[in-house]
Image (cartoon, rainbow, N blue to C red):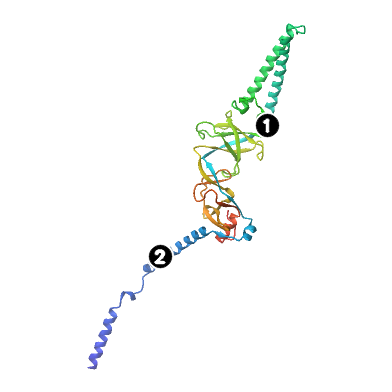
Amino acid sequence: MNKKMLALCVALAALGGCHKGPSEAPATAAEKSTAAAPAADSKDKDKDKDKDKDAGEGVTLTPAQIEKIGLQTQALQTVDYAEETPGIGTVIPHEAIAQAVAELSTAQAAEKQSRSALGRAQRLSGTPGAMSADVEETNARQLAVDTAALNLAKQRLSASFGRNAPWSRTENLSLLQALADGSEQLVRVTFPLGALPGEAPKTLSASRLGSGAAAKRWKLNSVWAAPSDATVPGRSFFSVLRAGELGEGERIIAWAPIGTPHPGVLVPAEAAVISEGKYWCYIEAKPGTFVRTEIDTGKPFENGYVVTQTVKAGDKVVTRGASQLLAQQSGSGADED
């Protein structure tokens, strides 16, 4: 009897070992990899969420901290933006203009004197104080010579500085005199062939050569057609710039608007910072809190960038101290710009 019971126990033990559940089997390498992948994806998503959260929450500073870093803001303004095309320009030395003006003034004075002398001789004709016929003929001949000299001076001026110059349409030579004495500067600009469709531009702006589209600009006035430049094929124009920071003979980049203007918001160039391959600015969401906001710099315009999304007119943008805010927010401990 004991032997039969012992054999039965052994058989039951063997039967139980053969029916172990699948949960007790060891995991394969593929199963371990599959289980680890969602965890890695989850970590990456958490990192992205943290970045978005950092950008959205921004940086909060106390008044003392704001004063310490010299942080400054300004309200964003609305501007009308149109696509622009660049051209190469030169600030004309005023010596050349002064020489032409001197020749014109001399010819005008001589012509005026000759005309007066002939008029006086003609008025005295037939009176006791009448001059001889030879004197009257001499005065008439001199007037003809001086008139020809005056016309030549005008034609030289026209050939050098354009037939449609502002002073050619009126007798007011104040602009010409201002260009001659250097209080105004004459700028000659040439645009490549096909760059300017249609009529001449009504306004131009200028920046230093190599300074970029968003650099400081100066407004040019009174645009008119100039004689073609033999060294640079294209359409040439003259324009007037108030004398200031540009030197005579300096080469510049001129910008002419093309297309229809569209409204946008001008973000100053000094407000832009670069991080993670993108351009950002800091907007003061509430007193002491500055939120990093992405901007599109595809429309450079007059010392900044025209932005049509993410910011609006009236927003207070940080124009000084943006790099310090970025360094503090990113935790790099160094400025990025």
Q: Is residue 317 visible?
A: yes
The count of marks equals: 2
| In-image side of 163 versus 1 (left or right) | right
The kind of secondary structure element at disc 2 is: helix
- State which tag comes first along the sequence, 2 or 1: 2
Q: Amino acid at mark 2?
A: Pro
Q: Residue 272 location in percent, x, y?
A: 56, 51
Q: Is residue 156 above or below residue 336?
A: above
Mark 1 closeness class: few <14, some 14–19, many ≥20 residues within 10 Å = some
Mark 2 or mark 1: which is in front?
A: 1
Q: Residue at x 72, y 12 (%)?
A: 139
Q: In the image, which disc is placed on residue 178?
A: 1
The residue that disc 2 covers is 38
Q: Residue 261 location in percent, x, y?
A: 51, 39
Indicate the quadrant containing the N terminus: top left, top right, bottom left or bottom right: bottom left
Q: Residue 180 appears in which quarter of the rendering?
A: top right
Viewer-nearest residue: 35 or 202: 202
Viewer-nearest residue: 15 or 303: 303
Residue found at the very far right of the displayed protein: 129
Between the residue at mark 2 and the residue at mark 1, the CA separation in whole angstroms equals 75 Å
Q: Amino acid at mark 1?
A: Ala
Q: Residue 156 location in percent, x, y?
A: 64, 24
Q: Residue 108 appears in which quarter of the rendering?
A: top right
Q: Residue at x 66, y 27 (%)?
A: 173
Q: Residue at x 27, y 86 (%)?
A: 10
Q: Is residue 145 above or below residue 318?
A: above
Q: Residue 232 location in percent, x, y?
A: 57, 32
